[in-house]
Image (cartoon, rainbow, N blue to C red):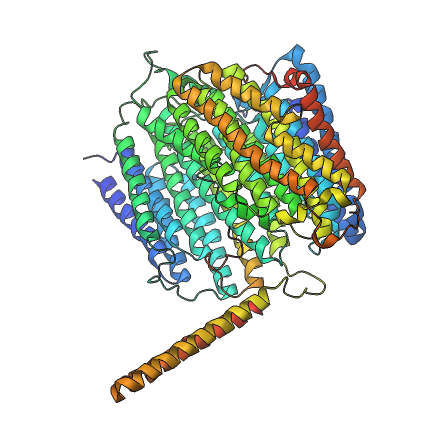
Amino acid sequence: MDFSAALPVADVVAFNRPAIDWHAASPELILLGFGALLTLVDVIFLDRAKQYTAALAGIGLLVTMVPILTLANDMSETGPRVMFDGAYVIDEFSLIMKAIFILSGYVVILLSTNYIAEGDYWESEYYGLMLSAILGMVVMASSRDLISIFVAFELLSIPSYMLATWKKRSLESNEAGLKYYLMGVFASAIMLYGMSLLFGASGETILTKVNASLSSDPLTGESLSSSTPVLTLAVIFVIVGFAFKVSAAPFHNWAPDTYSGAPIPVTAFLAVASKIAGFVALVQLVFVGFYARADVFQPLMWILAAASMIIGNLIALRQTDIVRLMAYSGVAQAGFILAPLAVAGDVGDQALASIVSYLAIYAAMNLGAFAVILAAARKTGSTSIESMNGLFSYAPGLAVAMTIFMFALAGIPPLGGWFAKFQIFFAVVEQGGTWAIILGVLLAVNSVIALYYYASVARRIWADQAPDGDLTPIRIPPSLGAALVLTVVATLVFGFLPGAVSQFTDVGLIAGG
Amino acid sequence: MVEIIVFAVCAAIVLVGAVGVIAARNPVHSALFLIQTLFGMAVLFISLEAHFLAAVQVVVYAGAIVILFLFVIMLLGVDQAEDLNIEPIVGQRFIAFIVGAATFVLMVATLAGSSDAITGQRQATGPLGDELTDNNNVRELAEALFTDYVFAFEATAILLTIAVVGAVVLAKRTSGEMLPVPQNTLEIREADYQARVDARAAELEANAAAAAEAGEDGSAEASSAAASDDDTADDEMADAEGGDA
Amino acid sequence: MEITSNWYLILSALLFSIGAIGLLIRRNPLVMFMCVELMLNAVNLSFVAFGDRLGDIAGQVSVFFVLVVAAAEVVVGLALVVAISRRRATTTADDLSVLRG
């Protein structure tokens, strides 16, 4: 009997397996492998694994750096690697951002080591969730289509919601998690609606194709202007969605509450890695997806940048809690990073390079500041700004480190921050239009305002008396010490040798943009 | 004609459900209204030739997500009605309506003005599928999913795994001894409660004194007011205790 | 009269606005999550309608991802609510006001 007529085999359409460049995907695969290994080790060894999980997570991150370095090494020969029809791209920008994510993730794990193990809220899944959030960021740096960006965004957000609630029995932490969650899902719904409009206006999901079809009519080749209302709305919705993530004013309300309620290492993670991931997505959308439509995104970025700088700085002036101070200063810093996007259409290369160097330096300074706050809180048990009083009298090393970070954040030469701020300033002024000059003036004025509150923290450290005259030194565990040394060295190197940074961050326009 | 009727009926079902979700006092009713909206959406999906998604909509959304909502509502016993007459932040609702209406008008205005500009017929990824051939909707969807979007697809697999792991960690009871209520929330609550009780007692006293001066009718009114006030005070006490337990 | 995809888009806009209003006026986190679901459904309808108009399967693929992610989000959100209600009896967003500043 002949069964072949009854079998559907002949009908099966040949499935073309997509070409996968395993070398390009190896950072993600290694991270995923270590995440799975962590979970497995935890399930098998239970409490006996407690002391090794942090080390294992740290090793995983360091191993992930290896393929990133080899990819960077190959970059000069092979050029950008493109997979899945342009949805996934490895170029200089994505490699630099991946390295920043992994190194800042490593510092956060160093900060977490003792904090999480000594706290009453130890759960072994902490590091697994942390690695998956970092995995989301690493994926984000390469995602060049709307769907991948959305999935990467959720992959980094969902573990963050849970990490912010990690102190389950603390009301503050509960509140931090719920607020962050509600704001996060609201933001992603808005962003998705914008993406659906963008898909409708362009008929594409791959960012380079979105850009191509937005800039000209595919049939006539003429410049397209009639879909501008839909496009404007789409761009506004997408950018507002990410503005929540980077805590740009007026979408910053969740940040201070979430930062002060979450465990301090998680706060550092949200304030640095998570925020940088939001900027990476914005940069990719602006420089690849919307680049032809500078008339739409530039005014929006101008407003966000100006509002964030002014609101962030003014509210930061009257904070009494150092973590909330850092949150509002983070809002102001977000304004600085958004400023070059407001002129990106005219001075693309320079704007991109200034953003990348700012992000690298921002990561080092902010992680360092949180490391000091964490160390000080080990003794004082509080994060109120008074707990910094007289830090010099009992912990001179920490006092010097904190002073370095504060002045670096304020942008005082020769510490890291000044180079970042100057690059942003020059990129903005370079454009030369009236609005750009106004933004430049705002940048300058806000730098001065910020100097006031950063310097007042430094003054407390050096000039004031320690509370109750208690001069017991702070015992700093080795991992925390390593994190402090790493961030101090990075901040100093970025400041004294800005050439070293710009050599890496002077990326050309993102591939395909 | 059939198309119009289907659209009209489903749109009505969807919108009534949506308004029901935000207007119902009881969260259980909100969840049931949500199911109504989701079923209406499933039919709309079919009329837009998204057959696979229509099935997924019913199975995943109505069948899993809303059931999960109902489980949590019942599990926690938070199905008490919320008093919608109290507006927590004055003017909040008004602003919310203005914002919502403005968004809607903006969206409709831009969409209505856009129809000519969107040319269609580009088919970047693949067609929607044709019932008459083997290239049906499910096959087209699967082919797109496992070629161009396979990386995002794998990423969602990780996402679902960590969501499950994280949810278990968050929701499980912590092993070992339960720590005392942290910090001074308890004292603050008690002090706060005591202060409110004192204030209320003083107020009642003043009322009673005023009523006594005013005469008999007034005092009767005052005592009934006092009785109802006692009820609310008891409720508050129950709330406070429940919160600390 | 013919039903064009614009009708679906306007329905989607209406649904999105209702969800957004609900999210802003309701205080019960569970109902707020449901409002987010309404907004995500509006997004789905808009993706499918655009996909139908363009004759492109990518719209439906996007919906597939939104569905999966929505499921993950709900799981995490409900776990948060359960974790919080272990600590306190009432769960409304206004009760959560330890942090103010």
Q: Is residue C49 left or right of residue B56?
A: left
The answer to whether residue A132 of the structure is visible from this angle is no
Q: Is residue A461 left or right of residue A144?
A: right
Q: Report the number of numbered marks.
A: 0
Viewer-proximal residue, A478 or B118? A478
Percent x, y for residue B157?
58, 39
Viewer-proximal residue, C4 or A246? A246
Q: Residue at x 59, y 43 (%)?
A: A160
Percent x, y for residue C7?
27, 37
Percent x, y for residue A321?
59, 47
Q: Is residue C76 above or below residue A276?
A: below
Viewer-proximal residue, A385 or A372? A385
Viewer-proximal residue, A153 or A324? A324
Percent x, y for residue A47?
78, 53
Which residue is most to the left? Answer: C1
Choose top left, top right, bottom left or bottom right for residue A407: top right
Quadrant, the N terminus of chain A: top right
The answer to whether residue A184 of the structure is visible from this angle is yes
Q: Residue at x 60, y 49 (%)?
A: A262
Q: Residue at x 71, y 65 (%)?
A: B177
Q: Is residue A71 above or below residue B109?
A: above
